[in-house]
Image (cartoon, coloured by chain):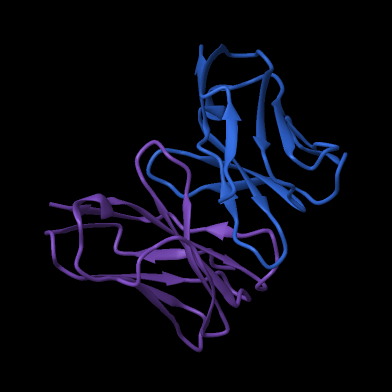
Chain colours: A blue, B purple
Amino acid sequence: GQQLNQSPQSMFIQEGEDVSMNCTSSSIFNTWLWYKQDPGEGPVLLIALYKAGELTSNGRLTAQFGITRKDSFLNISASIPSDVGIYFCAGHNYGQNFVFGPGTRLSVLP
Amino acid sequence: ETGVTQSPTHLIKTRGQQVTLRCSSQSGHNTVSWYQQALGQGPQFIFQYYREEENGRGNFPPRFSGLQFPNYSSELNVNALELNDSALYLCASSPGQDVPTQYFGPGTRLTVL
């Protein structure tokens, strides 16, 4: 079946630093989504991308839909302590199920 | 506008028992999907319900079954519980069967002893 890979698996950064993470697939997706999950909670939708090459921002977050439609990137600028959590990418094709990556765990050091 | 709610929050069962988990979709959403999230992993799709009909199923055995009611709330039933069914069970709702944006509830943590 379809699988997504996320890198890095985990990262430790200093408060104020920028963060980059990515998600890759062996299959093409029509839609890429990025979610954040805090401990004991469900994932929260951050950004949805609908078109290859699309670059979308949500506050300090910026995500891109890769040109090949097989990857996506998420950047967080000027990280703050509340950015701590697990970031999941998900791919979706019409008429098919959502596929989630294994997540990138972000820790922010004060 | 009320978000997605799930009950119970936590549940402990023993192997072989049966469990029912419940989900109320966000107002205006007619599609509910269920996911299993094992510790340290991403959510795995179980199945989706659209207007009371199952509309897609992941790689889960038949002992995982579900229902959707006329008010679009949903149940996930798991029979003959196994130890590796221990996980966070997430419900997500969306305003249509092929609408890519979905919104998750807080989950039900199931522990099977």
* Relative image position of residue A88 (x, y in whole percent): 57, 39
Name which quarter of the figure residue B16 lies in.
bottom left
Q: Residue at left 65%, top 14%?
A: A16
* Relative image position of residue B3 (x, y in whole percent): 53, 63
Lateral position of residue B75 relative to residue B63, left or right: right
* Relative image position of residue B30 (x, y in whole percent): 60, 78
* Relative image position of residue A85 (x, y in whole percent): 49, 32
Q: Residue furthest bottom?
A: B70
Q: Residue at left 88%, top 39%?
A: A53
Closer to us: A75 or A79 = A75
Q: Residue at left 67%, top 40%?
A: A26
Closer to us: B33 or B103 = B33
Lateral position of residue B47 relative to residue B50, left or right: left
Closer to us: B33 or B94 = B33
Relative to B32, does residue B67 appear above or below in the rendering?
below
Lateral position of residue B92 relative to residue B41, left or right: right
Relative to A17, does residue A69 appear above or below in the rendering?
below
Q: Residue at left 36%, top 74%?
A: B65
